[in-house]
Amino acid sequence: MHKLPKKLAVASTIILIVAMAASMVIIPVDAQSWTGHKKSYAYIGATPNPCAVGEEVLIHIGVTEALQITEDKWYGLTVTVTRPDNTTETLGPFDTDSTGGTGTVYVPSMSGTYKLQTHFPAQWYNYSSFDFFSGYQDVKCYYEADDSPILELVVGDEAKEYWPGVPMPTEYWSRPIDSQIREWNVISGSWLSSSGMSGQIVEGQKDAPLTAHVLWQKPLQWGGLAGGVGISEQAGVFPGDAYEGKFSSSLVIMGILIYQKYDTVGGDNVDNWIVAVDLHTGETLWEKELTNPAGERVLPLYGQIMYWKSYNTQGVYPFLFCGTDAGFFGFGGSTSIEAFDPYTGRWLFTYTNMPSGTRTYGPNGEILIYTLNQQAGYMTIWNSTAVIDAYWGTEQNSPMFGSYQPQGKTINATGPCPITTATPFGYNGYTHNITIPKGLLGSAQYVYPDDVIVGYQRLETVGMFNTVTLNDAPFVLWAIDAETGICKFNKTIAAPPGNVSLSVAAGSAEDRIIVLWSKELAQFWAYSIDNGNLVWGPTEPQHYLDVFAMYPIIYDGILYSNGMSGIMYAYEAKTGNLLWTYSYKDPWSETLWSDYWSSLRPRIIADGKIYLGQSEHSVNQPQPRGAPFVCLNATTGDVIWSIAGMFRQTDWGGSAVMGDSIIATMDTYNQMIYAIGKGPTQTTVTAPDHGVPYDTPVVIKGTVLDNSPGATDSTMKLRFPNGVPAVSDESMSDWMLYVYKQFAKPLNATGVEVTINVIDANNNYRTIGTTT
């Protein structure tokens, strides 16, 4: 069954600012007041017509008279449907929008001719208006009942064809994506906020890299081996670990990679430029310091892709939000944020007095901030699309209320404003003020919009970050309904004996669990976020080295856990059963802590794949060689591809990010930025084209070259004057090390498979063989 677009395009939701002729009998009461009656004209339409059995049909109903104010409507319209067998049904009642029309979806169940008719009930419409000649007028008008002409809907058995769509790309593609190619939304996602230490799950990346192929490279800053004689000259340039991370604030917004060019040491006394790069080509779009209108330097915090839909306008607005204080560990501490155009770096507007709390995104990309005051017993929800001072106008009954126009404004994001349906409390952004139980301990750990908020507190803890537990103290677990604030449970639960520490490890709304971790025991426990009961645990102890670091995350029903040991454990989230483990053995004993690469942890989880990268809190110099970057099948743990020594990660700077199914990452071995993804190729073929005797063998020659931006830059042309050969997926990792890092040339690399086709003397097109 064909599905109609959700927006329904009911009549037209654009405000009518035209004078509509009307045959109306007006009885003057006084100079400013009018009372009268008017004939109504009901209508009905159906799209598509003809249609097929089981196919959705949009029924357009209403009257020809538009209303004066955007919030007004006609009430109680119905539709009579007479089926081909002469049985009838009534649709509705329906209320219109201010254009006088609305719509509904109908699915015919039999073939033949249907008859449809709209019925408009008589009703009064009272309003105030302004006329330039008569001034303000109070109008009371009685609109007479009316039935529309009968519409015949012809229903057959054969469905009509609709727009076929565009298949997924099998070739190199770039931005912008024509908005008619809707199907590509599943491969063109963004990376809107910095990831945590356990990596980040991203959607819209359905073509995530299946090889280590480098699309392009560019220097972040001068890096790599110092050179010369002595141990210091065998070391590399300081990569930023610890405390001085590079490639920070890395985001991807609609195919634009954004990052900090330098670390933030030195503050405002040194340059700190922000760079925007086309993720598909590596071309720098802009590079500059970003400042607010007061001239203060700001740094990227997060991005937004907001879908705005109103009676005036519909469309997506992309924003880069920056603040004067990115905060320690990269947590935004700014109460004022600046919005910039990601494509140009142009300043757009300022939000002041931003609320604190847990930030997340709503279904249309709106920024939601949940603020809990557990002592006072209330919770507020702030919604960026409810900051009505960012609208064209704040009067709800004005046509300007339907347009989003924050450009050039400095807006108090929580300041007083008119009371409207968007701002029921008279303050910008605040859509909810919900009572919650007073005295909930600890803090909210997970906020799942429209679902549940889960909190945790370990009692009797001391020391830095409250990591030392005294007296076998219990812990408190609680949850409240995210919409009503009603407490689902608030439990004090006994901890394992032995003064062991407990920390929140991971959570999952889909699997309905919150997971706790004990570093001393190296074990997990899972508790229900619906009732606080133990679901499973403890698990079998993990490797002892995981006491020093642990990076758990839940994706698609699996809890992934790995840390200092270098062993990834995959547990079934609903049962705690161990499904598989993975480790990357260090054959050359480059690492100090074990036989496996430690802290090889998730950086990106997308498209059923987990991308693992290795880094350390404070790396020794010279750095251990061969740090792996690995792509695993997220379900089975099987290796899809891996590469050693190409994309070493960082603890303190920006980790690998993904957008448009392309990975962008800094490498701490040489301070280069690499994009990993599919690239274009160039194919040549030559063969004798004349003078070849019959039944004589000929030689067909050709090349397949990597035509990616990285393989064709000026440095590569010097090393590979005839071009960089394209190689097979199996040879890709070693080949990339040779091409981009000047490692030894692999002697066993194989080219891509080429199929040779000919048009023979009989004009037949056929395949004559394959080669590499």
Image (tube, rainbow, N blue to C red):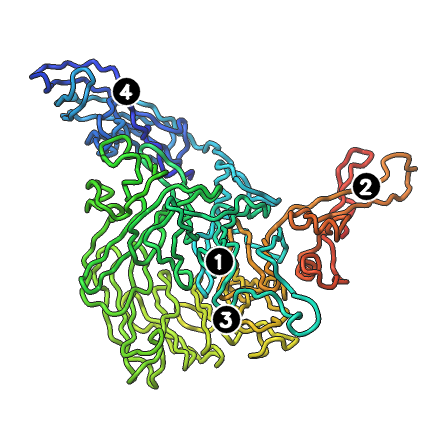
Percent of width and height locating residue 177: 52, 40
Spatial separation of the CA atoms under disc 3 and disc 1? 15 Å
Q: Are marks 3 and 4 in contact (CB under 8 Å)?
A: no
Mark 3, residue position = 617
Of tags 3 and 2, which is closer to the observer? 3
Q: Quadrant of residue 528?
A: bottom left
In the rendered image, the quadrant that contains the N terminus is top left
Percent of width and height locating residue 32: 10, 19
Q: Badge 2, how many Cα within 10 Å: few under 14, some, many 20+?
A: few
Mark 1, residue position = 248
User: Type of residue at label 1?
Assistant: Ser
Q: Residue at x 70, y 57 (%)?
A: 739
User: Type of residue at label 3?
Assistant: His
Q: How many marks?
A: 4
N-term mark: 2 or 1? 1
N-term mark: 3 or 2? 3
N-term mark: 3 or 1? 1
N-term mark: 3 or 4? 4
Percent of width and height locating residue 35: 10, 19
